[in-house]
Each structure stands twice: as structure tokens, then as C-alpha cells.
Amino acid sequence: MSEEKPWPDTIRAGDCEQHEPLVRRVLAPNPSPYTFTGTQTWIVGGGIGAGADVAVIDPGPTGSGMSIGDPPDANGAGHVDAILRAIQGQRVAAILCTHTHRDHSPAAAPLKAATGAPIIGCAPLVLNDDGPRADSAFDPDYAPDRVLADGERISGDGWTLEAVATPGHTSNHLCFALLESGALFTGDHVMAWSTSVVSPPDGDMAAYMASLSKLYDRDDRIYYPAHGPAVTKPRQLVRGMLGHRKQRERQILRELGKGSAVIPVMVQHMYKGLDPRLTGAAGRSVLAHLLDLQARGVVRTRNEEWELA
């Protein structure tokens, strides 16, 4: 979630932009308060016009894009055609998904049908939430041909991608490291424009913090997230994100130090000036913090009210 001014994107949805010799992106037409300017599909391998094989990371939405809002956001149409234009004349060796929210993985199936490429990456996950979702619902049709474990690799002409397990935003979330260039494709786990939504029951704050620490211990040169600008100082950003989450935890404990409280009241006090469209997301993240604190024996709940243990 972000309370900052929008980042002015440098390309239009559907265009293909070269970021470095082995990395291009195609922006999907599904902007929203939760996707920013839209989902960024990353193409790894051979430059534009080259005949070498490529990998497609987070193929994105197909027509529906997101499932939030009233009426639901219907953007995303035409994105598969845009990817096919970008890879014209090249062979797709793999279609990789960081996780299975509907702004990331639905285009995998039609892209596979068009190219014959296998769907590789995160495990399938479909979950009925116990409250209003603040982010995109899970993709019930995602069917990978191969699930990658932490550290497993796939390779093509001049490129190697290694899976980096980063649960937290979702339990099945993976990042992908491009070994030849030091780039890391971070999906929704780390983004410069926003903090990731951690929405229970699948979103897990303890796992999310552990995954951030895992990335902090790495030496990746640059992050390419699924939404927002590239991250050119990865460890600095991750350090700040760890500090931000710890600050939120301290805010919660200060609120509960005044007496028992319900989540909507805590959100109102903690997120001053928040876009009303993001209130649900803030509540889910507060709940994730509370469940983590409860597991550590610091807080407890009674009839939806939270208090210090």
C-alpha cells in the first residue's frame, strides 16, 4: 500500500521496453490502487528481434485483471497479445509465476496455448479468505507443469533463473534471480512504490519478515518488481521495509497500551490520510501483525477486541 504520489511510468500498456541486455518488460493495462500502473510482465533472454529462447515472468491478467472493487476492475484485456508481439520470432522456454493472485498468473494458460511453453514456478494455491480481501483474489485455474523449490534453476540461451522462496505476501510466493546479471524479479514481495499487502489467513507476517531478512542477506544488484519502478539500491530498501514493519508493530502495541481496541479503530489512528480505498488492505496488514504478536504471546483477543497479554 502506498500513500505517495503516483510514479510516472515511462511506457504505455502493451509496449515493450528494454531494461538491460537480458531483460525487457511489457506493462499490462490493469492499473488500480493495488497494482499501481499495472502488472509488469518481465521477459528474460535474447534482445528484441533475437532468435534465442526466452522466459516470461508473471504473464499477468487476462481480461479480468483484478477482482476487487464494485464493480470489479475489468482491465487486462489484450495483454497476452502484447506479450506475443514482444516475443515474436523467439521461443518461449518457460512461463514463470511468482504467485497466483489474479493480476499475475491467469495469462499463463493462454500464453502456454499460444506458444507450447511449460508453466513453471510457484505452487498452485486457492484460498477462501475469512474476511474481505484487500488484494487480488487467487487464480483458481493456475496449473503448473513444474513447481520450483527454493534454489532450483531453469536455463536457456545465455540465461539462468534461480527460484528464491519468499513466503509472506502469499505462502507460495517465489522470486527469481537472474544469475548472469545479478537481477532479482521480486513479484509482490518487494516493491519501491508500496509495501506489500500481507492478508491472513494465507498472508503471514512472520514469514514475510523472515523472507525480507533472507533478501537482505543476498547481494542482488537490482530488483525488478511486478509493480512500480526498478529498485537500484535493494539492501537499502529492504532495510527500510524491515524497519517500517517493526514501526507498525510498535504503533499497534502503543494503541493496545491505551486499552483494548478493534482493528478499524487502530487503522484510523495509525494510517492518517490514507486513501479510503486502501482501508481494507491496512486492516488486513494490522491483523497480520496482531496474529504474529499473538503467536509470540504478546497480545490476545476477545470478541474481536485485541489487548495486551
Image: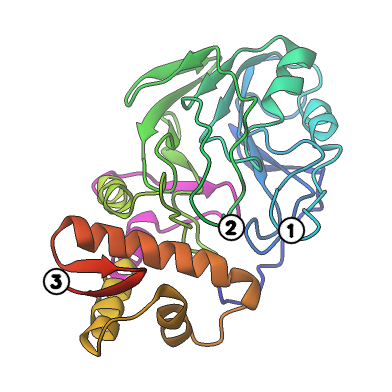
The image quarter containing residue 101 is: top right
- Residue 229 is tagged as 2
Magenta segment: does it hold 224? yes
The image quarter containing residue 18 is: top right
Q: Secondary structure at mark 2?
A: loop
How far apart marks 3 and 2 lie (CA) works out to 41 Å
**Residue range (magenta):** 217-243
Q: Earlier in the sequence, mark 3 or mark 1?
A: 1
The quadrant of the picture occupied by the C terminus is bottom left
- Return the x and y of residue 298 as percentages of the image width and height: 15, 67
Question: Looking at the image, is 287 positioned above or below residue 146?
Answer: below
Camera-side mark, 3 or 1: 3
Q: Amino acid at mark 1?
A: Thr
Name the residue located 37 percent from the left edge and 68 percent from the top edge. 304
Name the residue located 74 percent from the left edge and 44 percent from the top edge. 65
Q: Secondary structure at mark 1?
A: loop
**Residue 1 appears in the rendering:** no
- Residue 10 is tagged as 1
Q: Are the two marked residues, 3 and 2, in contact with CB atoms closer than 8 angstroms?
A: no
Q: Amino acid at mark 3?
A: Ala
Question: Which residue in the rendered view is the most extreme toward the bottom?
Answer: 258
Q: Earlier in the sequence, mark 1 or mark 2?
A: 1
How far apart marks 3 and 1 lie (CA) works out to 50 Å
Q: Secondary structure at mark 3?
A: loop
